[in-house]
Image (spheres, helix red, strand yellow):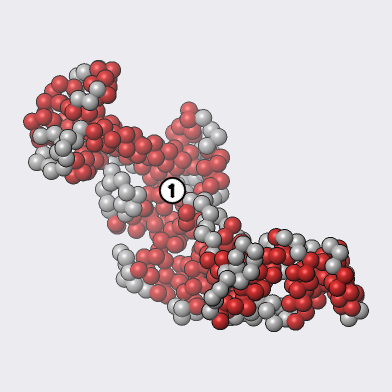
Amino acid sequence: MNAVLRTFASENTRGFFWSGLILFVLVAFDAPHVYGQAPSVAGGWAPGLRARARTVRELEEAWSKVTPEELLKAAEAGNPEAQYYYGVREWDEAREDNSRGSQWMMRAVANGKNLSESEKQASIAKWENASETALRKAAEAGERGALWFRGSKETGQASTRGRKGFEWMVRAAEQSLACAEFAVAVRYFGEIGWLIVPIDVKEGMKWLERSADHGFESALHRWADFYFGGRIVAPDIDKGVEYLRKAAELGCLRAQYELARHYASGEGQPASDDESPVELLKKSAEAGYGPALEALAERFRSGLGVSIDYIRAIRCYQSASAAEGEMSLGSRNRRPEILDLVDENFEPRSPLSIEYVKFAEVLGIYLKATERMNAPAMARLARFYIGGKVTRRSVVDAYGWFNLAAQRGYAAAAQERDELKQKMTSEELAEARRWEFRPTKVVSH
């Protein structure tokens, strides 16, 4: 490490950013490229096995409960899941160490200037053999040389630790653990934002291809993105669609949604009716994928590829608002603006374009019925279901809403319910008796 610091200090660099980057690269290349052969069989795993026994989340949940000592022992014994989890954990913790070291180095900057080369050499000579306690005290007291030396030392150690974590990921990837193959690939591509692994596109492509062959959804998505965007490979819409289709067949909600978008745009052809844009959106929406819920809502509202159904549209918009955003690390999706077409009293706002007037009216009635349990609004919903103009026709739903309104003392609803009952079949009546309001059943109910 001291040799690295001396080399680094003698470089003719300008500014903290470039000096820090050069340090990371020097440490990365100074570390040996030792990946070794596939570990011995352990924990039921064999070299070359196409392994995707559980999702990354399940894997992390399982190994996070293991003590660090047991985790390392399992990794050393050759368990690829343990190797992957240990490697990722080491990488992540090393990045935190690097951030702290960078903060020390930032504190050494005075009036926008980093230490001069002579000052860096003097700092190395002064602090390389000093105790950690003395170095820490001097840095905490604000001595620029100590600040720079401590930061340089910590970022260098972090880089070494991070590379070792990467080597554990490689060991897991060599046993065909698909998530590890993907983790190795993106680090070779330089997509993690920490350049301690030399960028090697050829190696990245190799591991990405292996991960995709083993059915890892993120790898399939990355290939699709490459082909759609023409990044690294020549643009090829058909190949991009094919990778999305593979991910969609595995049940990937994002892939189902994106495949629907591409088909709707005329990019690629569905292989069957089950692959139509609407059917793909339904599959993704029924599983709670927010973007698919909102896209399906727009179709129910506008009648694009489906019959107009304002009530289903409203339920989809509401579910989209509540759904966890997969792309935002668990945060909630934004509230669709269309749900704000009514005011706090659920009355349509004005002015509204002609396209939204009727929808806003139905939205207000629906919210009064479901959130305020307003009996007249419930009766109006029932009439919508009888008419079948702004929602699908359903005597069962109409009966259910009339019945709810009647239970709240609305006599007109009770009368209309009884009149409707005389026109219903025995099967419809049996279903109506089991009817209950289920707002989360956004597609089929």
Residue 357 screen position, x and y as percent: 59, 78
In the foreground, 242 or 367: 367
Residue shown at 46% from the left, 40% from the top: 85
Residue 272 screen position, x and y as percent: 58, 78
Q: Is residue 121 above or below residue 171?
A: above
Asked whether the viewer can see residue 348, the reply is yes
Q: Quadrant of residue 397?
A: bottom right
Q: Is residue 246 above or below residue 386?
A: above
In the foreground, 265 or 348: 348
236 left or right of 42?
Answer: left
Residue shown at 13% from the left, 23% from the top: 125
In the foreground, 415 or 60: 415
Asked whether the viewer can see residue 282, the reply is no
Q: Quadrant of residue 411?
A: bottom right
Q: Quadrant of residue 276?
A: bottom right
In the foreground, 317 or 207: 317
Q: Secondary structure at mark 1?
A: helix
- The number of callouts visible is 1
232 left or right of 332?
Answer: left
29 left or right of 258?
Answer: left
Residue 257 screen position, x and y as percent: 52, 67
- Could you tell me which quadrant the N terminus lies in? top left
- Could you tell me which quadrant the C terminus lies in? bottom right
Name the residue type under label 1. Answer: Ala
Residue shown at 22% from the left, 28% from the top: 147
Q: Is residue 183 above or below residue 297?
A: above
Q: Is residue 375 above or below residue 208?
A: below
210 left or right of 234?
Answer: right
Q: Which residue position is annotated with label 1?
A: 180
Residue shown at 15% from the left, 21% from the top: 126
- The crowding category of the residue bearing disc 1, from other C-alpha atoms within 10 Å (few below 14, some 14 to 19, many at least 20), is many
Residue 154 screen position, x and y as percent: 28, 31
